[in-house]
Image (cartoon, grey):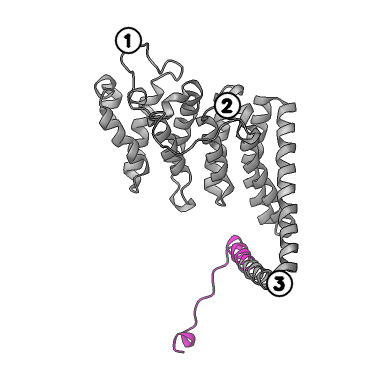
Amino acid sequence: LEKISIHFPSTMAPKNELWIAVVKCLIHPHAWVKLTSSRILNIHITNLSPKALVPPEKGSPKSFLVAVPGSLYEIARNLCFQLNAEDSEQAETVTLLAIKSLTWIIDAMNDHPELCFKNDNEDMERLPTRDEENGGDSGRDPVLWLMKRLSNIAKARGYRRREAIFKCFAAFASCCDPSIILPHLELMIEPLNRTLTEISSKAEQSSSRRRSQVDADESELPKEVMQLLEEKCGTEAFLNALAAVKSKAREKRDKRKQDAAAEAVHNPQAAAQRKIRKQEHEKRRKKRRVEEQRAMRGAYAKKQRYHDTLL
């Protein structure tokens, strides 16, 4: 199929059922199936222009993206599923293909949002609107949905997962029009700021030089992406969005403290259990940090002695 899509694209283009199967294979558990379907899809969409995707009324569709309504949304959802894989399951080749495809898809979503929906009457996953927070309703916005999905993925811990999302944001900043990025700037900055804050906190708690070097390496990509966003959207818009993100983070932190204090007064038993869980988590964190430092020094785990095995 990959060779056919490269050398005879016109032969494969009208095979809608075949393309639907390729889209489903994007989330196949087997690595080779996932990689091959990603390559086939990327070859297809990169030969199309997002702006000229919808043909004239009398013309025939150039792609299954037009002939099969809702397929653009399905592709974006499956590619997000790829990027949300655990660090042990992240594959660099698949990740890069997903980023390239999403960079094209976000342009297509912006130019032709109607292609993301099967029909007006069918129940689908409700996509957010740009005016939801203000109580308005301007219709479902697939670009906003995609930005929220990527932002939420980057909130979860995992260096390679976050790296994939930050590279995706960098691709958006490099290739997309500022009009696409500006309305969603806070969603992109939030996980970047969260990561830099976590790295800064770890650096303050650790006195190891090697740990500091690792933290510096991990913070390099988020800083570069934030610089790209500032250059793309302008310093004023970037600083306003960054200030809003930091303000919201501070409000959430203060609210958590207030809730914990109120719980200690109204429900002491639950507060005590929360404190015990926190202490156990802290013990595990310290143990994990010691093991990381031992590994960085090249030390090996203690071997089990012979007389211990006889007990």
**Quarter of the figure that contains the N terminus:** top left
Q: Is residue 200 left or right of residue 142?
A: right
Q: Position of residue 240 (x, y in %)?
A: 74, 32
Residue ID at (35%, 46%):
31
Res. 207 in view: no
6 w.r.t. 186: above or below? above
Residue at image mark 2: 174
The answer to whether residue 284 is magenta is no
Q: Nearer the viewer, residue 269 or 41?
A: 269
Residue at image mark 3: 268
Residue at image mark 1: 58
Disc 1 vs disc 2: which is toward the camera? Answer: 1
Residue ID at (67%, 51%):
198
**Element marked by disc 1:** loop
Q: Amino acid at mark 3?
A: Pro
Residue 285 placement: quadrant: bottom right
